[in-house]
Image: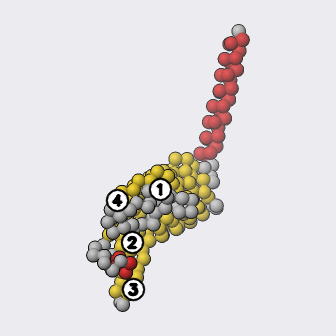
Amino acid sequence: MIADKKAALIASHLACVCVLVGASLVASSAHAREMDGRFGIGLEQSLGGANGLALRYFTSESLALQATLGVDMTIVSGDISAGVRASAGLAFQLARSEHAHLSVGARLTVGYRSLGALQIIDPTATTSDVHLAIELPIGLEVWLADNLSIGAATGILINIVPDGGSQLAGTGAGSDAPPGSVGIGIGAGSVTGTLFIFYYF
C-alpha cells in the first residue's frame, strides 16, 4: 500500500515536470525571434580566419546561408598585388529564443595571396599560395536589439596549410599548423578571435 502511494506520488511529480518542461518549450518557441527571409550584414572572423564583410540570409526560420569576404591590396611602383580571405557555408539553428540563438554549421574557407603580394613579404617566393580550411562551427548569437546581434563561435577546424605558409588568420586549436601540413583543432577559435556583429533588415 505504501509502495503504491510512493509510486503514485512519483508519477504525479514526473507528470508535473513534463508539463512544466513542455510549457516552457512552447513558450520559448512562441517567443522565438522571427528570422525567415531576413538578411544581415556585418563584420566577422570565422574559425578558419576569413575576416571582413559578413553576409547572412535566412532561407527559413532555422537555416541560414552565410559568407565572409576580406580583400587587401598593395600598390608598389604602380603594380597591384592582392590577397583574399573568404568563407561560405550554412548554419542551422539548434535552439532559438527571443534573446539568443545557438547554431551549428559547416563552412569552406579560402585564403589566397598573389605572387606579387607574397614577394613583398618574401622576395624569394616563386608561386602563389591557396590556403584551405574546413570549419564546423558552434555559434552563440545574442540579440542586443531587434535588428542587432553579436556573438562568437567555437568548433572543429581542419586547417590545410600550403607550403608557402598560412594565408588565413585563424585563432585557437588547429590554427598554428606549420607550412605544408594539416592542423586539426577541436575547440578552435576564441571569444575575441571569432567575434561577430550583424545588423538585420
Amino acid type for the residue under numbered disc 2: Val
Instruction: Point out residue 191 in the picture as x, y percentages from the top left corner.
Output: 57, 59
Amino acid type for the residue under numbered disc 1: Ala
Q: Nearer the viewer, mark 3 or mark 1?
A: 1
Q: Earlier in the sequence, mark 4 or mark 3?
A: 3
Between the C-alphas of marks 1 and 2, the distance is 23 Å
**Residue pointed to by mark 4:** 181
Point out which mark residue 173 bears.
Answer: 1
Q: Nearer the viewer, residue 168 or 40?
A: 168
Q: Give yes or no for contact between labels 2 and 3 (Cβ–Cβ under 8 Å).
A: no
Residue beneath the point at 27% across and 75% down = 126
Residue beneath the point at 35% across and 90% down = 78
Identity of the residue furthest to the left in this view:
126
Tell me: 24 left or right of 67. right
Q: Nearer the viewer, mark 4 or mark 3?
A: 4
**Residue pointed to by mark 3:** 75
Q: Quadrant of the C terminus?
A: bottom right
Amino acid type for the residue under numbered disc 3: Ile
Instruction: Point out residue 86 in the picture as x, y percentages from the top left corner.
Output: 41, 66
Q: Earlier in the sequence, mark 1 or mark 2?
A: 2
Q: Nearer the viewer, mark 1 or mark 2?
A: 1
Q: Nearer the viewer, residue 27 or 166?
A: 166
Point out which mark residue 48 bears.
Answer: none
Q: Quadrant of the N terminus?
A: top right
Between the C-alphas of marks 4 and 3, the distance is 31 Å
Tell me: 26 left or right of 171. right
Q: Earlier in the sequence, mark 2 or mark 4?
A: 2
Q: Nearer the viewer, residue 38 or 69?
A: 69
Q: Earlier in the sequence, mark 1 or mark 4?
A: 1
**Residue pointed to by mark 2:** 84
Q: Earlier in the sequence, mark 2 or mark 3?
A: 3
